[in-house]
Amino acid sequence: MNKFVFSMVVLRLLSGSIEIFAAFIMFRLNQVEKALMVNTGLALVGPIILITTTSIGLLGIADKLSVSKLCWIFIGVSCIFIGIVKK
């Protein structure tokens, strides 16, 4: 298995495990305020995993892409993050 693919898979499994663990914590706490705090913490995990996984994927295909295509990918990812941050 390609090391880049393996790294991306491991990160996604880690992210999913964190999400499931957080769901169990929210269920166990059984209070809206505390569940909201756990959910807010998850808001940090998602973008970090997205950035890391995308970066690893781009490193894996960087030798196959032209500079202009990499710029377009960077612009697209930037637009996603602007959309997430802006209200």
Image: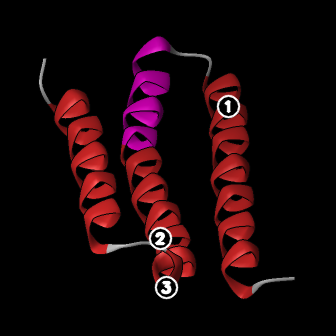
Please tell me which residue is depicted at 49% across the width and 57% down the height of the picture: 49
Q: Is residue 73 above or below residue 83?
A: below
Q: Which residue is mark 2?
A: 58
| Segment tinted magenta in the rendering | 32-43
Name the front one of labels 1 and 2: 2
Snapshot quadrant of residue 23: top right
Q: Amino acid at mark 3?
A: Asp
* Majority secondary structure of magenta residues: helix
**Rendered-image quadrant of the N terminus:** bottom right
Snapshot quadrant of residue 82: top left
Q: Which residue is mark 1?
A: 23
Q: Is residue 77 above or below residue 67?
A: above
In this rendering, position of residue 62 left or right of residue 60: left
Whichever of callouts 1 and 2 sits on the residue coming sooner in the sequence is: 1
Residue 25: give x, y in percent of width and height: 65, 36
Task: Indicate which disc residue 33 carries.
Answer: none
Q: Nearer the viewer, residue 74 or 85?
A: 74
Residue 5: give x, y in percent of width and height: 72, 73
Question: Could you tell me if the residues under marks 1 and 2 are in contact, i.e. CB atoms within 8 Å?
Answer: no
Q: Which residue is mark 3?
A: 63
In this rendering, position of residue 45 left or right of residue 40: right
Can you name the residue that lies furthest to the left here? 86
Please tell me which residue is depicted at 39% across the width and 18% down the height of the picture: 33
Q: Amino acid at mark 1?
A: Ala
**What's the coloring here?**
secondary structure
Whichever of callouts 3 and 2 sits on the residue coming sooner in the sequence is: 2
Q: Nearer the viewer, residue 64 or 32?
A: 64
Between the residue at mark 1 and the residue at mark 3, the CA separation in whole angstroms equals 40 Å
As helix, strand or loop, the secondary structure at mark 2 comes to helix
Between the residue at mark 3 and the residue at mark 2, the CA separation in whole angstroms equals 9 Å
Name the front one of labels 1 and 3: 3
Q: Nearer the viewer, residue 43 or 9?
A: 9
